[in-house]
Image (cartoon, rainbow, N blue to C red):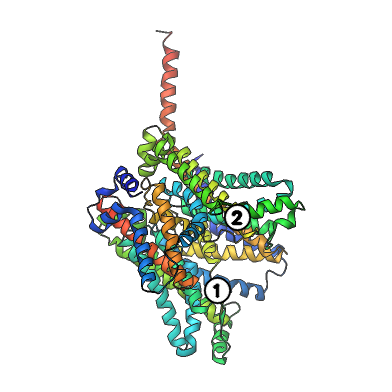
Amino acid sequence: MEKAVAKAAAVDGRSVGSNRLGGIVNQVGIYGVALLFILLGAALQGAGIINNFLSAQNFFNIIDAVALLGIVAVGMAFVTYSGHYADMSVPTTMALTGIVAVELLSFGFVQALLAALAVGLAIGLINAVVVGKFKANPIIWTLAMNYVTMGIIRFVWVNKQIYPDMKTDDKLTVALFDNIFRYRFFNVVGLPVVVMLVMMVLAHILMTRTAYGAQLKLTGSARKAARFSGINVDKVVGIAFLLAAFTATVGGLTVTSLSRVGAWYNGAGYDFRAVTAVVIGGMTLAGGRGSIIGVMGGAFVIGLMNNIMTLLGIGTFSQDMIRGAIFIVVVGINAKSLRSLGRDDA
Amino acid sequence: MRSKHSTLTWVDKNRIFLLFAVVSIFMSLFAPRFFNVFNLTAIMKTVAMNACVAIGFTIVMICGQLDLSIGTVITFAGVLGLVLKGPLGYAVSVPVAIAAGAAVGLFNGLLVAKAKINSFIVTLGTMTILQGAIYTMTKGNTVSLSTPDAFVVADFLAKPLLPLVTPRILITVALVLVAEVFLRRTRSGRNFFLVGGNRNTAWLAGIKTDAYIIVAFVLSGALAAVGGVFFAMESSAATLKLGDQSLMYVLSATIIGGTAMSGGKGGVFRTVVAILTLEMLYTGIILFGFGNEVKIFIAGLILATVVLYEAYAVYKHEREVGKRPELVKELEAAAAAKTAGSPRR
């Protein structure tokens, strides 16, 4: 694994950093940080402060806990990679698609999922046109889109939470929807984890092995240069937003199925969490740098961090503060090393 | 042709004042129980908070940056002001709360200007940190005061000196006027526009761009805190959702008011008129008997429409930049003359 990361770093040209701290961070990548956290956890367990950190069960817990975040972060990574910072409409896209799926369960399981997918992609398409073609400020537009979607949810469903068994009498459909994401392969690996891994592999191939990936990299690095070399940049950027909406939809269905309720607050906070995973995974906001392998590491590190903090007995809200602080520090180091390469993040 | 074009430009430039006139006349005529002192006072109470916050937010946007942390700064300052009032009294707790807001702004500004991190990501980070801080401080409960002296202060702030004009509104109006005059009439004020218009040019012209960006964020933090803490004092209570709606509200108002998303253009007074217009509109919606849900829905739609309109205007402008319709016509005319002339020769 380390070798693959080093190779990815070399391909990205990230190892050129002359700044020492940034250089080290770029060289070892996020997996070095992960290793540090594992050592920290091991040290804490050795000192007898926490228990059960170094156990197979705990590692499966960590991976289970970050599966949802990983799924959403994959799509977000494409938006960041295209140089458009982030898709802030992810939280309500997750909520709305989940609600739509539950609402339409009476038409059948597959139909409900397809309808949810259509809704999610519609949101993505709007983002794609407005940001890709009309070049609206991506943050402000997707934030506006987030409010619109929230408005739709509140307008149609008011404050109601909807449960699958309220919407259909078909026991089988309800059971299927409520339990599908709880399914465990070999009683160990949960379906969300498998979905995350499949999406990450596909995304990695898309980003590194296809023409679209190359076009996206050039668009993210230098949009004008990409346009003058004949790339349809509007389309390339638009597809990135569609991918983000797609993964948000899958994430929305996952969270709705796991919580067994469709509600407006499903997905709240996933904008920030996904951006965190993407950015501490080494993908920079300037666009065109980083890899899906890094993003996977970013999600894993967040999981490790949460796990250690929970084992230490730190409260949820204090965890928020620590996560926010670590996030800013990591972004700061990234920006510093980028500047030493002559590229500003701002 | 030209006069029509310039009329449209004039309308677009002054759209917020026209919208204000339309909304206020429409609501006064048609919305039930709209035009009375009680309702207008209620409108002014919310406007006083958001107008205050909007001053700083607009300055940050003029600098070409974005401050997503204002909503949590409002709540944080409101909660902090009330929590510290118990042991210290308002005379200390209010300045401390405002200073805390300014400190958050300083933190944002330093990271944006000196560490060169994108402002959206910095303020997203501080937003998360503050949310944690708010919940840690309050353990998730609403903070409310019920001591007599707190009520005295609350009554003083809310008591109209003239119809509608409460001391809190006077404070806000004073702040808006100072900010507007500062931005329009002083050299340092106008430099904010230069920094937002083109940071490199501004730097080459000898402006300390970093300092201006830091000051903009400090003002944004401090003014958000002022808005939050005075609102909390007037209510003698601070819920944990105090500033939740403000980001959308202030962002919409700033853009409707004509401040450019890319920076370098805009004004505080216009934003505040937009805040007033939006609040009248939202209150009107409620008075017409629609629920809060409809209000949230329409608020989102308005923001999206305005952003889309602005983006489309820029898109159209950029397509037309460099095109020379009169030159094309001339060439066509020359070609036509040539084809018409050639048979004769």
Q: Residue at the spot x=50%, y=49% of the render? A: A196
Across and down, in percent, residue B166 comes to 56, 80
Across and down, in percent, residue A254 comes to 58, 53
Task: Please give the chain letter of the residue carrying mark 2.
Answer: A
Instruction: Check the image and report above or below for A89 versus A312.
Output: above
- Left/right placement of residue A241 relative to residue B32 reads left
- Left/right placement of residue A241 relative to residue A148 reads left
Amino acid type of the residue that numbered disc 1 sits on in the rendered structure = Leu
Q: Is residue A176 visible?
A: yes
Q: Residue at the spot x=69%, y=62% of the render? A: A160
**Label 1, label 2: how far apart the Cα atoms are:** 34 Å
Q: Residues within 10 Å of mark 1 (few under 14, many from 20)?
A: many
Nearer to the camera, B226 or A87: A87
Q: Which residue is mark 1?
A: B240
Q: Is residue B193 visible?
A: no
Q: Which mark is residue A182?
A: 2
Q: Residues within 10 Å of mark 2 (few under 14, many from 20)?
A: some
Nearer to the camera, B84 or B253: B84
Nearer to the camera, A17 or B149: A17
Instruction: Check the image and report above or below for A241 versus A336.
Output: above
- Left/right placement of residue B284 relative to residue A302 reads right
Local SS, label 2? helix
Q: Residue furthest right?
A: A169
